[in-house]
Amino acid sequence: MTIEAEYRARYDTTLFPIATKLEALLQDILSGQARIDRISTRPKSVDRFVGKANAVTKDGKRKYDDPLHQIQDQIGARIITFYKDDVHRISGEVQRYFHAIESKDMLPENEWEFGYFGNHHVLMLLPDLVDPHFDNNLVPYCFELQIKTLFQHAWSEANHDLGYKPGQQPLQSDELRQLAFTSAQAWGADRVFNDLFLKREGR
């Protein structure tokens, strides 16, 4: 059976219902938290999974030997907040309920660069999210959670659409600089809105 066929069986039978239950649980956990714009979950699409599973390194070697077990974002969740200071507050609240395998802030490589920003977690799936009738061989052990501000989310979505579609020509140097410029603007807007919010709150 091909990777595509194996993943499609997993997508149809387990990933979609688990993602639906996970979204409801996150909504419940965070129902009392202020300044959350949206909470969403989704299984990774078949096309995107297959593309990631077939990825190769710079020296031409396959990136994943066992993609069905190694790729951790087969189920993805997003929480979009208003302000930067909300991100780590919400992150801490989520980690009261889920065991974290990995947690990190995604940042450009150095302070002279602008690009992707976000708070990422790889979290263990709770047993309650998995129907006992599911074939355990089709159930991932974890999911990926991204927590971002509205500006971080908007930039990353547009950046992915512009730069990562299969078959597209790579962006030119000047185009990459334009994307970095928009990231810098989003970073600045986040700082301004967060500072204004803190002043209004007397902090």
Image: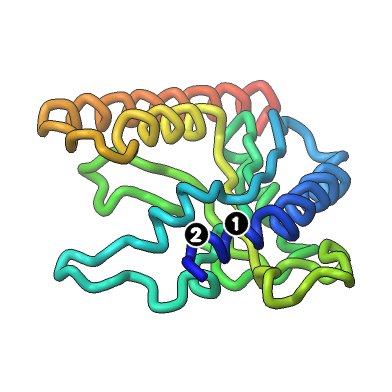
Dot 1 corresponds to which residue?
Answer: 8
At mark 2, the secondary structure is helix
Residue 202 position, x and y percent, is 68, 28
Question: Which is nearer the eye, 146 or 96?
Answer: 146
Q: Is residue 75 above or below residue 30?
A: below
Circle 2 residue:
4
- Residue at 35% x, 24% y: name it: 185
The image quadrant of residue 85 is top right
Residue type at mark 2 is Glu
The residue at 82%/42% (across/down) is 27
Q: Nearer the viewer, residue 40 or 95?
A: 40
Tell me the element at label 1.
Answer: helix
Is residue 42 shown left or right of residue 32?
Answer: left
The picture places residue 191, in percent across and down from the top left corner, at 46, 30
Quarter of the view holding residue 122: bottom right
x, y percent for residue 11: 65, 55
Q: On the picture, is 38 further left or further right than 62?
A: right
Q: Are marks 1 and 2 in contact (CB under 8 Å)?
A: yes
The three-letter amino acid code for the residue at tag 1 is Arg
In this view, the residue in front, 115 or 170, is: 170
The quadrant of the image that shows the C terminus is top right
Residue at point 59% right, 45% down?
A: 147
Q: Position of residue 104 (x, y in %)?
A: 49, 60
Please count the marks in the image.
2
Q: Is residue 202 above or below residue 43?
A: above
Q: Residues within 10 Å of mark 2 (few under 14, many from 20)?
A: some
Q: Is residue 81 above or below residue 134?
A: above
Tell me the colour scheme of the image.
rainbow
